Amino acid sequence: MNHKSMSVTIIMFILSLLVFSASSFAWFALSDTSRVNEFVVPVNNYEAEIVFQVRKNGGSYSTITTEAEMTAFLNNSLPGDLFDFIVTIENLSTSSVVASIYFNDITSENPNAGYDMRNVFYIVDGEVSVNASVNNLPLNSNTPLTFEGQTFSNYRLNNLIDASQDITIITNVNIPISQIVFIEFSIQMDPNTSKQEYQAGIMRIASLLAVFDA
């Protein structure tokens, strides 16, 4: 009897372990597939309300909250399409803050080698305005780039990104207590883009980082 009871106990233990393992696997699988990547990511512990709004070709503004929404917004674009962006930041903390805004992890996917989507999208005139005050983005290179007969804008995204595939949109914006700033810029798909190979490409921007400091 003791031997039989021990065998039953061992079998029950093994079954319980298998059920637990299956449950854990299901939880991890569901967590991974259901996770939604937030597009606006605040960095450092300051209270602020951040809203990222976009519009296409002068239409109505809508709010982007996830990476998937941003990817869908930019893709299926046609040459000449214009995308306007507004980042609204309200300082809700108890002291002034300094904000810096970055586009994080900008990548191109295209089965056609050499047809980088980051070359045919550019920030219009390299300008970013903060409460209507215009700032110009620094270039990695002033040398024009030509590929397959097309000379790209010097403000193409590929000429603005750093080694981490990020773009610094604006830095050191002072926001007093309870004040709001509006950061505005536009991205256009180069109207001179005629090669059909770009139609297979996808450009991704993983997130908008808002870094806050005292």
Image (cartoon, helix red, strand yellow):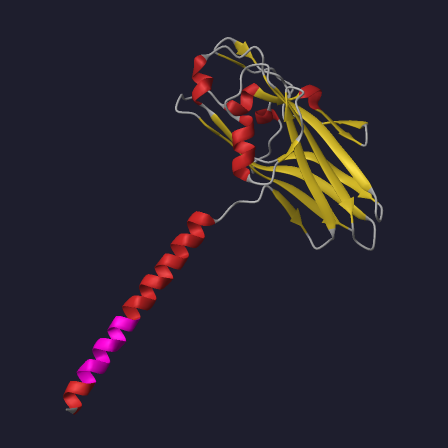
Q: Quadrant of residue 69?
A: top right
Instruction: Please tell me which residue is depicted at 22% across the width and 79% down the height of the picture.
Output: 10
Give the image location of residue 91, x and y in percent: 79, 47
Return the residue found at the far front: 60
Task: Work out whether 198 lies above or below 131.
Answer: above
| Count of labels in the image | 0
> Which residue does the image show at 46% across and 24% down from the upper left?
201
Residue 196 visible somewhere in the drawing: yes
Quadrant location of the N terminus? Answer: bottom left
What's the residue at 43%, 51% (across, down)?
A: 32
Q: Quadrant of residue 83?
A: top right
User: Which image quadrant for residue 200?
Assistant: top left
Q: Main secondary structure of the magenta part?
A: helix
Residue 107, x across and y down, in percent: 51, 32
Q: Say above or below: 82 vs 150.
A: below
Is 12 covered by the magenta stretch?
yes
Q: Which residues are magenta?
A: 6-16
- 214 on left or right of 74: right
Which one is in front, 94 or 16? Answer: 16
In the displayed structure image, the side of residue 124 where residue 15 appears, left or right: left
Question: Which residue: 79% across, 38% down?
Answer: 181
